[in-house]
Image (spheres, rainbow, N blue to C red):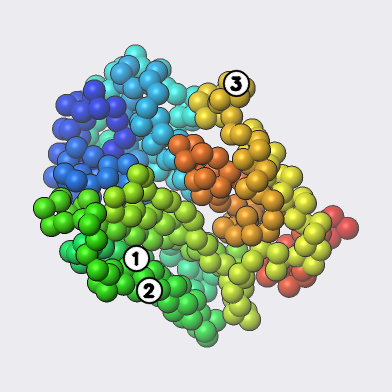
Amino acid sequence: MEDLLVFFSYAHSDQDRVLPFFDYLKSQGLNVWMDCRSLVPGQNWDFEIKRALDKSTFVLVFLSNNSVDRRGYVQRELRLALDKANEKLIDDIYIIPILLDDDVPTPEQLKGIQNIRASMPDCYEKIVAALTYQLRKLGKERIAAQDEGGITWTKRKISESWDGLPGYEVELEYFEFQSTEYQNISQVGDYIKGQLLASLFAERAAKLTLVTPYFNYGQTRYLRTNTYDAHCAEPVINGKIMSIQYNVDWYGAGAAHPNHHFETYNSLLDPLVLIKNLSEVFKLPDEAFKFIQDRTREQLYAVRLDGDSDEEENCLPRDWIDRGTEKWEDFDSFKFSKDSLDLLFAQYQVAAYACGPQFATIPLKDLTKWMLPEFVSAMNLEYLRWAKE
């Protein structure tokens, strides 16, 4: 269970009430992350929290009368977790709300998720049971996805660090693929691994850099260390198209704040071809772009940062959205789910850093009339194309 991370999201005024949950789950052999126990002096807390949330398999959201009516980091964590929950199946257990106070109102975004009350005598056992159930389900889903797609995969990790001025710390995940149906499938993993190693080589170049006046060994190591983390989600196979999403977190020593962006790898499996640009999928790219641009902007205009208020400060700035969706290159982070094209936008692309990453989803059925026939066939969408015609 070492790679399966349980993230604790809570208001700091509730820390003493939350710590017993951390200690219990840790005693059960679970890999748990809570800022007051997992952060060390000198680390950039904003970066490390976001990094841990990206890696998390589960998020325990502790709700109390101290947290639900307050704006703050716990609300940002919840928004990020809800965005990530969109990648899950409807019956997946990912976010588990835990009510520290029996009378706490459940936030609107969590009302459809079964909660657990801390006052229950078997509260701890219920949490472990929910986590164990989902872990078994994830294992079965991976096996089912591999059987259906005719591909098996194993996740690997590369970790390397060096204590320098500045130093670096790198953690990279990638997949090794095997298949009797697609003979060259291992090359997908080789290609992605090569792209990741290029980032590692770039960080190693710090060893050739002269010591700068900004860093010295008297500083805490984390203040003089560049950190690069590339964490991948499970591959998604839609017919003969495979998509892999990476969340990349990077923090430069001494920087004001960390950076986060997405990298996606999409492949046609037979013949084995990398889909580098979204425009390659369409026979009528100009018409497809206008449709994708309009639908994406429509969804981003509707984003509300806090509740349903239409006040200007509660919406993403339209001019920022428009600048970030002007050309095909702005849609380079994309993936194909079973029924949709999913578009991912990093911080700063369509909104300010504090607003976090943003997402848009377009049903594949709405795109088939512009697609090249090879991709319509690869994703088994012929019936949709015929229905449109």
Q: Secondary structure at mark 3?
A: loop
Q: Secondary structure at mark 2?
A: helix
Q: Is residue 201 left or right of residue 318?
A: left
Q: CA distance from mark 1 to mark 2?
A: 8 Å
Observer-side mark, 1 or 2, equals: 2
Q: CA distance from mark 3 to mark 1?
A: 41 Å
Q: Quadrant of the N terminus?
A: bottom left
Q: Quadrant of residue 178?
A: bottom left
Rendered residue at 23%/24% (across/down): 14
Name the residue type under label 1: Leu
Badge number at residue 197: 2
Q: Quadrant of the C terminus?
A: bottom right
Q: Secondary structure at mark 1?
A: strand
Q: Which is nearer the eye, 115 or 359?
A: 359
Q: Is residue 293 left or right of residue 53?
A: right
The residue that mark 3 highlights is 311
Vertical placement of residue 123 versus 334, above or below: above
Q: CA distance from mark 2 to mark 3?
A: 45 Å
The residue that mark 1 highlights is 172
Lower position in the chain sequence, tag 1 or tag 2: 1
Which residue ends up furthest to the left in the rendered image?
218
